[in-house]
């Protein structure tokens, strides 16, 4: 495992993957997904979510200003691979986790599509 992969694994171990009994495996999967996205020139675009659903917030929370974003993962050709919306007040660490989660989802979709078309 490379030094950058070890650093990524440690980051995701500390910031994501909180499934009981699966934490290390989830962190490693996210580190691999992040590297796969980098290797394939996938890019994340963060845009304002102009129509977020904030119904889960209290009235007091909704009255406060919030940054609500969407994240779009695109391949090297600009095709949308995955997206997530309604991301409220994310910090840089959470944005990194979201990007890796989207890459993981796109990798799974690629594998499933390859399996379907191989038959």
Image (cartoon, rainbow, N blue to C red):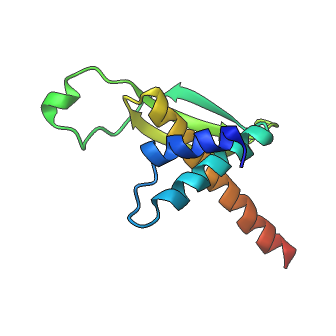
User: Which quarter of the rendered picture does the C terminus lie within?
Assistant: bottom right
Rendered location of residue 72, percent (x, y): 60, 37
Q: Nearer the viewer, residue 116 or 50?
A: 116
Which image quarter: residue 4? top right
Rendered location of residue 80, percent (x, y): 69, 42
Rendered location of residue 101, percent (x, y): 55, 48
* Image-based side of 95 in relation to 40, left or right: left
Q: Nearer the viewer, residue 8 or 100?
A: 8
Q: Nearer the viewer, residue 50 or 62?
A: 62
The residue shown at (54%, 35%) is 96
Residue at the extreme right? 118
Which image quarter: residue 109? bottom right
The residue shown at (19%, 30%) is 61
Rendered location of residue 20, percent (x, y): 38, 64
The residue shown at (82%, 37%) is 77
* Image-based side of 118 in relation to 36, left or right: right
Residue at the extreme bottom? 119
Residue at the extreme top? 65
Q: How many marks?
A: 0
State whether residue 92 is above or below residue 118: above
Q: Nearer the viewer, residue 51 or 110?
A: 110
The residue shown at (60%, 39%) is 7
């Amino acid at each position: 495992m490379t030094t950058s992969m070890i650093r990524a694994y440690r980051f995701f171990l500390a910031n994501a993957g909180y499934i009981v009994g699966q934490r290390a495996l989830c962190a490693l999967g996210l580190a691999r997904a992040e590297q796969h996205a980098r290797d394939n020139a996938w890019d994340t675009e963060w845009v304002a979510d102009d129509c977020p659903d904030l119904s889960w917030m209290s009235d007091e929370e909704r009255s406060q200003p919030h940054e609500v974003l969407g994240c779009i993962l695109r391949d090297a050709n600009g095709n949308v691979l995955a997206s997530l919306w309604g991301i409220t007040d994310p910090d840089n660490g959470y944005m990194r986790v979201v990007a890796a989660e989207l890459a993981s989802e796109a990798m799974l979709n690629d594998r499933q599509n390859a399996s379907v078309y191989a038959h």
